[in-house]
Image (spheres, helix red, strand yellow):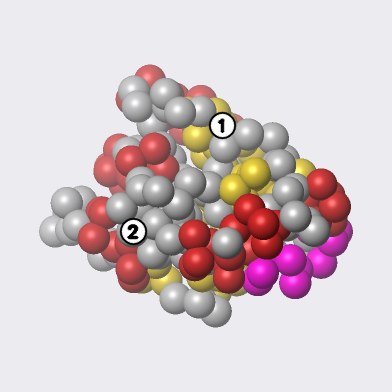
Amino acid sequence: MIVETFNVGMLSTNCYLVSSNETKEAILLDPGLDFSVEAKPILDAISAGKLMVKYIVNTHGHDDHIKGNVLFQQKLNVPICIHSLDEHFIEGTEKNKFPGNVTLENGSIVKFGGETLKVLHTPGHTPGSICLVGEKLVFTGDTLFAGGIGRTDFPGGSMNEMRRSLEKLTSLSDSLIVYPGHGETSMIGEEKRSNPFLGRRSKDLLF
């Protein structure tokens, strides 16, 4: 699995182009563009790698993760995948012109080429927030960052739900690389050791 990272939008969202080295099939994760010009390096990478993008996938429905959905649908003619509880965020997309949205649930599989990512429902930041777990990595959206977690004070957010979602993430292998929605990459093991929301002090912070 090959992961290319593009920093997009005013909130510096990590947009990921994730591809299979064998088949050249790919997914585009969280294209939260603020300006159409930000699409060019992503489209150039797709062209240069001769990639066939199969899906646009949103880890949740906030604007800084979905703003580029329609632009890339126009260019790629592919469906948008999002958890059913956050689908209302993208109901304005041009359904009649492009493939219909794919709703994801906990345990759903996103398959492209020989690669698979398993959906882990991790509400807290939004009701439909998800993480995508692979053999060697996990895309955590705005649930888990290097050294921090996503905000829970937006409409639909919940600290109690976030606590339960973080417990799910602590059960993952320490060796998984963490690709968050913002900021630098990390490792699940490192976050267990140093992230105050996953470590010994987490109960004081999350209750």
Ranked by sequence position, the earlier of labels 1 and 2 is: 1
For the question of whether residue 162 can be seen, the reply is yes
Observer-nearest of 201 and 28: 201
Image quadrant in which the C terminus is located: bottom right
Amino acid type, mark 2: Gly
For the question of whether residue 138 can be seen, the reply is no
Q: Residue at x 40, y 57 (%)?
A: 157
Q: Residue furthest left?
A: 96
Q: Which residue is mark 2?
A: 156
Q: Is residue 160 left or right of residue 146?
A: left
Amino acid type, mark 1: Phe
Quarter where residue 140 is shown:
bottom right
Q: Residue at x 64, y 38 (%)?
A: 4
Q: Residue at x 75, y 72 (%)?
A: 171
Observer-nearest of 73 and 165: 165
Q: Is residue 8 left or right of residue 97?
A: right
Residue at mark 1 to residue at mark 2: CA–CA distance: 27 Å
> Residue 43 location in percent, x, y?
47, 33
Magenta highlight range: 167-177
Quarter where residue 16 is shown:
top right
Q: Secondary structure at mark 1?
A: strand
> Residue 191 location in percent, x, y?
77, 51
Quarter where residue 48 is shown:
top right
> Residue 152 location in percent, x, y?
45, 52
Give the tally of numbered discs: 2
- Judge whether 178 appears above or below 50 on screen: below
Q: Which residue is mark 1?
A: 6
Image quadrant in which the N terminus is located: bottom right
